[in-house]
Amino acid sequence: MGIAQENRVEVKSMLTAVSSKPSRSARVHPFTALDNAMSPHTLHVIVYYPRSPFGSFDLDSVRISLSELLSMYPPVVGRVAKTPDGILEVKCNDAGLRTLKAKVCVGIDEWLRSADGHDESDLTAWGDMPEDPSTWAPFRLQINEFQGGGVAIGLSCPHRQADATTLTVLLKSWTEAQRRRCIVHPPSFSPLPSILTDDTDAVKPNSATISKPISTKTATATFRFSSSSFKKYIEEDGIFPKASPFDVFAALFWTRVALVKRKSHDRVCMCVDFRRLLPNPLPYGFFGNALNFSSLEMTNVADQGIVHVARLINDHVTNLTVEKIRSDLNRVGEQELMYGGDLTIVNMEHMIVEGDPMMYEAVFEDGVRPVHVSYRIGNVGGEGVIMVMPSPEKGFGRVVSVTLPEEEVSKLLVDQEILRFEPKIILSGVK
Amino acid sequence: MPQAPMPELTSSVKLKYVKLGYQYLVNHFLSFLLIPIMAIGAVELLRMGPEEILNVWNSLEFDLVQVLCTSFFVIFISTVYFMSKPRTIYLVDYSCYKPPVTCRVPFATFMEHSRLILKDKPKSVEFQMRILERSGLGEETSLPPAIHYIPPTPTMDAARSEAQLVIFTAMDDLFKKTGLKPKDVDILIVNCSLFSPTPSLSAMVINKYKLRSNIKSVNLSGMGCSAGLISVDLARDLLQVHPNSNAIIVSTEIITPNYYQGNERAMLLPNCLFRMGAAAILMSNRRSDRWRAKYKLSHLVRTHRGADDKSFYCVYEQEDKEGHVGINLSKDLMAIAGEALKANITTIGPLVLPASEQLLFLLSLIGRKIFNPKLKPYIPDFKLAFEHFCIHAGGRAVIDELQKNLQLSGEHVEASRMTLHRFGNTSSSSLWYELSYIESKGRMRRGDRVWQIAFGSGFKCNSAVWKCNRTIKTPKDGPWSDCIDRYPVFIPEVVKL
């Protein structure tokens, strides 16, 4: 991983994909306080397919279904503008989605085996919003073709404008449009329900939209745990009956990372999507940020057993009530960085709908399911992020990706407790 | 003040009836002469009674030789007449290309690309924005895929693939609509002004559809936006020479290689207006097509003003200071177009105008020449000669100018304005999109006359007059099928960008 190698991803061309129908009204999409609090971060989703649905690219039917889908998402093809009061909002002017085409000089299997976090970041477009965002495309799609077939579709945007669920639903809807199926989760642009926003102040003008880059050198590694390893753990170590795979794997990584960090006080930030946690649940198609960030503390977590920590996590997540969500929303402006100010654990259990992980249901051609889906957050704080994501195999398996300072990741890769679960390690740069 | 307008109203109504009465009198003059004569003759015959008629008949003393000679003479004259009559040329059907939604160019995308590519030339960007605001184009016009790239990639390959995309799609649609088999095509004419590869576009069509080896194919290039009607003229002449034949005309303009990449203002104008489009037309002189043909070609008049230097140089392709090739449009384009139109009208007027208008024009001409040179020239009312007008959608200014010169109402130029809004300036194929608009609106009835006017570099003004052969039902597919219900739209003078 320390060997410097040239870029294996080469961007060949850039164009702008437009929506199929003009959005007739001069609509404006405002940002909520939560949206603005997410502003230092960027969000990137990368979906790997073993076979590319793209052909000549310019005349593909996939491009036409993308255009039709973009007509349903005016904020995705709009541009960010500042009102005279200095408040940012999206002008839905149909300018389009920037689309880049890139070629990767290795095959997809080789990539998954040997690429590291830095390599993977070449698969999507990065870059912060400039001072004058009128010609800057916030949403950028990158189509990366691997040698010998296979494609990685990367979609990135400022975290201010969308969260992981929004981007996942968008990609899944694209595949549904391509296969001429009914779109299961159409977008919803209504604001957050009043039950959550009654106490919040009016949206304040953004004071620091561009933050300093994070100085510590971070690395990313992805661990794939199968269903059987979870079951094996339950048999061997015993766990309380209501434990979900998230509780177990989050607890596992929290304890091992705490050990590696050698910290005395142990506080994590738990990131949970609250779309389905409200008494009137928001639809999955809700466009924007619907994330709850709450703190969780446990002393000397490194010495605690996983069972104990898992129970704490379980209690914490189950007790997320509307009042708790509302009070957390009120406090969003207080932190500078939502991810990584404390070690952040991201919960994606809500993406498993009726046993099927939503991101792995984004299928362009029958029988060609994604082999892997990565989520990356940009400008993460020094404490790092642990993301517990659904696994392509349905069931109790999970895919955990960690973004931490380099030395901590290299220690985790040889941690015996983690290796006991027999994970398949990918995208860690290990040759 | 209700009293004051009333006398004007009644006087204008009176004037209208006077005009109508005059037109009926002059246009049907012969009938007015013949009917009384026939009536008198019939009355005389009835008065005479059958025996007297027989007596008169017998007194004429016809003998066999005289009767035979007279009948042979009559047959001979009628044969000469029918043989020398030019063949009727039919327009069986036509098909216009509808670009895919991925090629759409919203205003915001066009301006953003312009800003990104011309980032050192804000004045040129400003200029393009002002042109686009006043252009009369809508948000659904299309540019070929290569132009959507930042920066555009106008390779020869990309130009060929645009040509293949637009031409083959239009021709496939035409073959499907008319049931024509490719091997039955006798004449093929392709016109595309600015892209002329080797082998030619007509050879490309012959290769794709495996047309016959003895096909008469012609490829016209460099003839500008009026090349569509030049192709129709050529097809007509070829169909006069070859009996029992059909001809396919493909009119298009390939945008990819001609997207101006420099920043000279006068040459940036075409980038804002020219858009992707194509049309394929099937013409025939076969008697069997007379039932299913949509139109009959009545007249085609071509006027070339190239002898005048100002007209010749007004649309000029040249390199700018940095070596980028573009088309320079001179500032007196509108004046030159007006003159070319006048020349064309002078030729076509006598062919199409009813006798009443021609008489008025003649009287006013005599009056101006002999009595008072300061008399205003009488502009004949072309609305009496045609039901529909298709003015080449070269730009808003062209349509405005013609509407003013020919005194046309908003509805007459609606097809042109709406085509400019929906498809932009598609060059030689725009006339066919406009005709399709009129058909899609269900306005085309049997016997309606259509006047197509096209302007082109050179400077040329060509016009064609078609007569509708059968009432045309609203087409179910076609370039307007998904949006005709939204039209006509109000196009503001300036769209704020």
Image (spheres, rainbow, N blue to C red):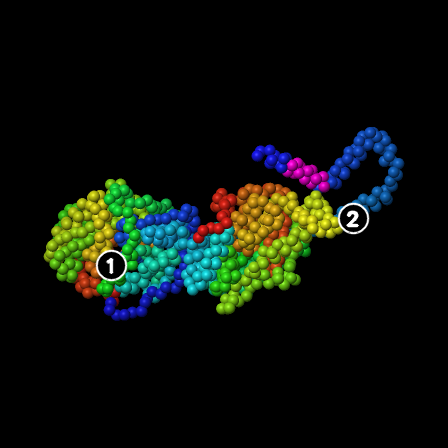
- Chain containing the residue with disc 2: B
Q: Is residue B202 visible?
A: no
Mark 2 — residue?
B76
Q: Which residue carries the number 1 mark?
A: A380
**Which span of residues is magenta-colored?**
B11-26
Indicate the amino acid at tag 1: Val
For marks 2 and 1, give the CA distance.
Answer: 99 Å
In the image, A218 versus B58, the foreground residue is A218
- Which amino acid type corresponds to the residue marked 2 in the rendered image? Phe
Q: Looking at the picture, how far across and down is residue B406, in whole percent?
A: 62, 48
- Residue depicted at 60% across the width and 56% down the height: B335
Q: Is residue A256 on the magenta stretch? A: no
Secondary structure beneath label 1: loop
Asked whether residue A94 appears in the rendered view, the answer is yes
Judge depth for marks 2 and 1 and give the one in front: 1
Residue, x 65% and y 53% (percent of image)?
B342
